[in-house]
Amino acid sequence: MKNLDFYYKKAIKQGFALGAFNFSNLETLKAIAQTAEATKSPAIIAVSEGALEYFGAQFVLANFSVVKKLFKAPLFLHLDHGKSFEICKKCVDLGFDSVMIDASQLEFDENVALTKKVCDYAHKKGVMVEGELGQIAGIEDNLSNEENHFTNPVQAKLFVEKTKVDSLAVAIGTSHGAYKYAGESKLRFDILSEIEKCLPNFPLVLHGASSVDQTLVKSINKLGGKIKGARGVDEKLTKLAIENHNVVKINIDTDLRMAFTEGVRSSLKEHPENIDQRKYCLEGQKGVEKVVRHKIDNLLNSANKK
Ligand code: G3H
Ligand code: 13P
Ligand code: ZN
């Protein structure tokens, strides 16, 4: 099978991106894998440290290997936001395709040292590494609009040279979770263009890229949820970043969580007598499938790229 590096290169040449879809239940994993197969799209299955802890690493591996056998799509297992050398080493040793070392909270030199340490180890075993420079926060941290938290393009070049990282997560105005912007969404394309100039043809990653579909927000709130004011990144902006700026990996978690929650809530509302979790989880799964298909077809343009 072609490796992730092959798809990153292809994505840069052809102006598409791979979805890095987080999963934290089996219905979501299945939804991602079968939609990737149906659309002939490569996809990254992302597991956070929290998800690893929730399932247990062996459970994640076993289920990933089952979906890889069952669904004929190029699927890659990726550690999302690994915070230490130890967790990255563990995932490399377990056979993950790729790990992210997120040392973005550290000072530049310390970030370089830790990211390099992970790269030195992972590369010997053929595993790819994503680093992060700048801070991709949540609006509640009051960081997203502060100049000094965006990625510095000159530092980005230095960071890649020193660490030999394979891809770089950049901070250009996105943030994690369902509450990204108080008003209109904005991305700093000026910074992205500078990064691209400093790092030509280098794979860039956008975290916090959920669009937080307002129809789902309204529906969840109507069904008893409380996510008032939830707002994401306009997909038109993310699409521009993919088509024109070497962004080859788009991280999506919140949109999948919302779709699953909406499916479950509406199923339970319609059938309050039901206690069979297969019935309401299936509605959650269908919601996730719809979102993954929408992203692949309308945002990522990764269909038929397998
Ligand atoms: O970027 C983080 C992902 O959304 C994973 O979140 O740590 O709650 O699993 P989590
Ligand atoms: P969202 O919260 O926007 O889905 O971002 C997910 C993410 O970046 C996972 O690493
Ligand atoms: Zn992230």
Image: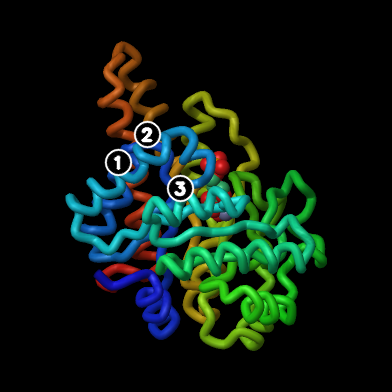
Q: 52 or 247: nearer the eye? A: 52
Q: In this view, does 214 lie to the left or right of 138?
A: left
Q: Name the residue under label 3.
A: 47
Q: Name the residue under label 2.
A: 263
Element type at marker 2?
Answer: helix
Q: In front of the other: label 3 or label 1?
A: 3
Q: Does the residue labelled 3 lie within 8 Å of ligand 1?
A: no
Q: Is mark 2 within 8 Å of ligand 2?
A: no
Q: Between disc 3 and disc 2, whose residue precedes?
A: 3
Q: Where is residue 99 in the image (x, y as percent from the top left)?
A: 49, 59
Q: Can residue 211 be seen in this view?
A: no
Marks counted in the figure total 3
Residue at point 36% right, 42% down?
A: 60
Q: What residue type is labelled 3?
A: Val
Q: What residue type is labelled 2?
A: Gly
Quadrant that contains the C terminus? bottom left
Q: Position of residue 232 (x, y in %)?
A: 58, 53
Mark seen at residue 264: none
Residue at point 54% right, 59% down?
A: 100
For ligand 1, the image quadrant comes to top right
The reply to whether dot 1 and dot 2 touch (C-beta < 8 Å) is yes
Element type at marker 1?
Answer: helix
Q: 66 or 57: nearer the eye? A: 57
Q: Name the residue under label 1.
A: 286
The reply to whether dot 3 and dot 2 touch (C-beta < 8 Å) is no
Residue 29, placed above or below residue 99? above
Residue at point 62% right, 36% down?
A: 228
